[in-house]
Every structure is written in C-alpha cells, then in structure tokens.
Amino acid sequence: MKHTQTFLMLVLLLITALPLHADEEWKARAYVHAAKPGITEAVLPPELFMEVETMRGRDRIDLALAGPDGNQRSFELFWREPPLTVRFGLKPERMELTDSGEFIWEGNAPKPEIESLHVTIRDTNFVGQVDVEAKKDNAWVVLAKNAALFRSGGQTRAEIAIAAGQYTKIRLRFRSFDQAFKMKVLPVDRVTASGKTAGRNYVKETIAPEFQTAESGEVTEIRTLLPGSGLFIDSVHLVTETQFQGHWQIGRETIINGERTFVPIKKGSISTVSAEGNELTFAISHKWQGKSLVIKLDPQGRYLGTPKDFTVGLFLPRLIFSADKPGKYIALAGTGEKAKILPNPGSNTRKIAQALLFSKPEFNPNLTELALTDKYRLRGGPFNSDGFTWTAAVVIDTPGYYRLPFPMEASLAPNRTGIRLAKEKSQIPFFMDRTENVDVSLPLTPEYEESLNQTTWDLTLPQASPWWVSLNLTTTGIFKRTVTIQRPKPGQMGWETWATKSWQNTRDDKTTLKIPLTRLPKEQSQLRIVINHNDNQPLTINAIDAVYSAPAICFLAHDPGTLTLHGGHPTLPPPTYDLSLVQTKLLETLPTPIQAQPITSVTTPFWSGIWIKHFRGKGWGLYAALGLVAVVLLGIIAKMLPAPEKE
C-alpha cells in the first residue's frame, strides 16, 4: 500500500510539472537564473509577446512562468511606474545663533527633486517666521520669505511650498519671539522635504527585423514579420536610397475572401525636402495586431531606389515575480495561460532584490513549418480539368507550407483567378498572395540613322496583356534626351506617337528610365523606342526590361509528390477554401518559395465529350447529336460510293 501511495504521488507531481515542459505546449521560451531568493524583475523579450486572439484590444498576452522544479509560478506584468510623492528626513549639518538673534539650521538636500519643506518645533509658546534658502549650481537662492510658524495637531509646525527643483543644501533662518516679544531660540525637532520621484518610464527597445523589398506596380513595398504578436509599437524608422516624396501607407496584411489583403493603419504624404534627408520616421504609438507589418511608398514616378535600413521601436513590459529558491525560471509563450499587463506596478513599496536579463529566446522545434501540415489537414474538393488550356508540374520534396508565384503565361492571362492546384482528382486549397513585379529582358536590336542622328529600337512583348506595369530602359553616362514611345497605327500602317518621356542623368553612373505601361491597350504587344541625339553622340541603351505584375498562391502540401497547376480557363471564378479559417497562423509563418515546371499546353480533341455535356438533360440535345452524327456518316458514305458514269 505504501509503495502504491508513493507511486501515485510521483505521478501526481509529474502531471503537475508536465504542462509547462511538454514540447507541444509552448511556442517560445526564455529563462532568467535567480542567484538568490527575493523579488526579481526582468524585461519581457518581444519574442515572448503573443496576443490572446479572443481578447484583442486588451493588454493580455499568452504567457506562463515555470520555476526550477517545472511547476507554474505567479508573476506580474506592468508597463511603467507613475510619479510618486515621497518625504525625506533631513539631517542638520550646521546650527548657529547669529548676533542679530536669528537661528540658522542648515543641512544637505535629498537627491530627488523637492517641492515643499516641513518643520516641526517642540515649543508652543512663541510666534515666529522662517526664511528658506537653497544651494543650486554652487549659488544660494531665496525660496521663501517670512513663512509663518503655526500650531496644528498639537504641534507647532511650518509647511513651506518652494519652487520645485534639485538642490544640494537647504538653509532655514528662524526669527521667533516669546509672549513678551523678546527674541527666542526655537528647539527644531524635525525638518523633512517632500517631492515627486519620476518613476521609470516604458522600457523601449529598438529591433532591426529582416525585411523584404518588392515592387508592386508603381509602389515600393517593405514587408517584415515582427518577433511577436500584439506588440506595442512606438515608431518605425526607414532609410531610403534617395529622398522620398509622395504618398505612404503603413499597415498589416490579412486574408480576406481567400486573398492576402493589405489593411492600412496610417497614411500620409510628404511634399517637402526633409531635414533628415533619406530617413523616414512613422509614429505609431499603439498596440499592433498580429505580426505582419508593411510599408507602401508611392514616389509618384520619382526614383526611390532600394531601402537600406529598417528598425522598429517597441515598448516592452516588466515581469516581476518572487523567486522562492535559486535556480532557472522559464517564461513560456503559447501555453494557453492568459496574463494581464497592468498600466502601473501593483505595489509601490516593494523592493527589487535582483534585476535580471532573459536569455536569448528559443522556439519550439516541434512547431516548425512542417507541423502546420499536421495541424491543419485541410482537403479540397474534387477536380475537373475541363476548360483549362495549360498545366505546369509542381514538385514537392517534403511536406510543408509553400509560396508559388504564377508562371509568366498565367500572370499575363486575362483571367488570372481561373487557377487551380490539384493532385490527381482532388484540389489543393490555397489563398492568393500579394502580387510582385517581375522583369523580362527584351532583345536589343537598335537601328541607327546617321543622317538624323537617331536610334530606334523595335520591341515585342512576350504577349499582349493588361498586366504589364512598365518598360525600363537602362544606360550610363551624363546626358539629356527626349524618349518617344510609338505604337503601330490601326491596320499596321506605320507608327504613331503614344507617349514621350524626358530622360536626364547628371552623374556618370547607371540610370534607369521607367515608362509606365498601365494605359497600354491590352491587345498591344509591339512598341518602338525612338531617341534623337541632336548634336550629341549616340546614346547606347544597355538593357530594356518589360515588367509585369505576378500573383502568387500559398498552400499546404501534406505529402511529397507532384502537384499540377492548371490555368488558362477563360471564365472560371476564384475558389473559396477553408484555408482562410487558419489565416492568422499562416500569416505568422514565412512560406518556403517554390517554382513551377515549364508550362505544357493542353489540346482538347473534338471527341473528348466536353461539348456533349451541354446536351445532358435536354431532350432536343439528343436529337441534335444524332442528327450531327447522321450528317457525318452520310458524308463518309458519299465519298465511299463510286462516282456516277457520264453519259
């Protein structure tokens, strides 16, 4: 019986400690090592900041604290300390009676800022006044004159308001008289000073997360994932290659109707030359939902270049707990425990025994990208390949979370939403990711006409499409030219001017002219670039790139193998999958990039049966089909019969 009780006790202790140590029950953790028992303080790392999804907008996060024995411990989180009024006792350094009958009391002032003095006298049979002087910056200043001493609460005292400040010494000059109006020395019992302690403000930490830069149309996008969700952002700082002017937006991404969508939080415009040069600072000053952070910069056609530096200023809470024994205390995020962050500390009188730093946060190795496929086993419906004109193989080596950009043919197709990803006869759920600009190099075939000192480049886009963004011309040198863009006249009867652009470079280095193609007719695929050099040497263009916007899809692959991307359907609407239900988790994970194999055209034979389905369920359809077959058979029989003999 005794052995059974011991075994049950061990099992109970194991179960008690297990929830905070089980590998599947936490997502991120960090520890502090307490060298001694006592009240312990540490700043919570941003990686352990995980908002509670069901309580957004409130200062609650998913956090737990485990002690050295693995059992859960109590703790407190708070943002900052408010100013407090504190009273300090002053000790006299000099007491002196002057020839004029004044009693002088002098002592050192406290280090914090003080705003009033309190004097208590043991004697009650007198009337008197006091002057207050203070030493500041090695000079004495008068803070109060002829302050009255009065009786209150059974004591004679003076409460003297002074100009708030930090002083090094305080000097009091007493003048008092007895009932016969003779000078009298006062027995000073106590002198105290009161003032406000500033209190510790928010803990601010600046992080430099990894970021990606992409072009989407005319807009430059800077994207990052914050180390935690629900963080309190003070500001965002960005350094660009050149001075930015134009419209800006800062926000986050979410999935709406199966498509990754940008949600703006703040926006504005810059029309002046900033004193900070190429530096941009965006004040946020509030809690940020999720981990996604995106900045959109529209320079209005001006050259911006590539952003160089990106930082985020965060406010972080302090974590307080009572270490009951020396050892390692582990903070864990993602256990399901809810912790509230107080605006101010719960106690203003407690003393911190030790202030520690958390270790570098680590993440649960069992919650990798591969674990998403085990947790979210979402399946698509049946797949029908009718109507698709091309396919592309997508080879999956290992299960995981992937991002697949559209091939060029799919990106330039009129109906870009008519895409399906399938494995054999089943659809693979996906959601539409953001679009990005993709460059395609065009062959250079310049024709130079010496008599006009003019160069012409005939260009052919890979295919006509409404999704072309721009035509980028690149060269080097110091020059100024007018670039004429021409298109074929109706009926291919020569060329006509479509647009003109001024191109200038004042430094002997690389420069790029961006010619927008958003207004190019969607059926147009041929263009001509004409540059007249006037009296200057001919300008050589080193590269011409056509830029189009390419969508992408994100999906979970549960098994290795080959998937097939189907496209080219002229009328198929976008799909609706249950994948949007787990959008938050997917947006907080970076997918693995993957590319599709070259596209293969699908040829549909006449007798494939696709056209016959239109007659299903219609009585007249059967007769029409039989009539068509009869006509074809009669034609075949007529050809087989011998021709009639001529008379």
Image: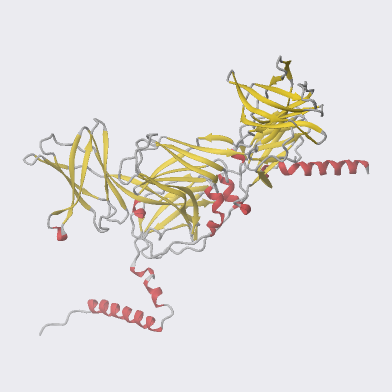
Residue at the image point whose x is 10% and y is 39% from the top? 453
Residue 60 in the image: x percent, y percent? 64, 47
Say if 249 sits above or below 357 in the image.
Answer: below
- Comparing 20 with 148, the one in front is 148
Farthest residue, direction right: 1
Residue 323 in the image: x percent, y percent? 75, 33
**Can you see residue 407?**
no
- Comparing 131 with 508, the one in front is 131
Residue at the image point whose x is 67% and y is 42% from the top? 23
Side of 544 relative to 48 (left or right): left
**Can you see residue 644?**
yes
Residue 249 in the image: x percent, y percent? 43, 48
| Quarter where residue 360 is shown | top right
Farthest residue, direction left: 451
Side of 590 relative to 545 (left or right): right
Farthest residue, direction bottom: 647
Side of 424 relative to 448 (left or right): right
- Comparing 580 with 564, the one in front is 580
Say if 236 sits above or below 134 in the image.
Answer: below
Residue at the image point whose x is 81% and y is 36% from the top? 153
- Comparing 145 with 328, the one in front is 145
Say if 506 sits above or below 106 in the image.
Answer: below
Q: What is the quadrant of the N terminus in the image?
A: top right
Residue at the image point whose x is 35% and y is 70% from the top? 607
Residue 216 in the image: x percent, y percent? 37, 48
Side of 325 relative to 478 (left or right): right
Farthest residue, direction front: 180
| Quarter where residue 222 is shown | top left
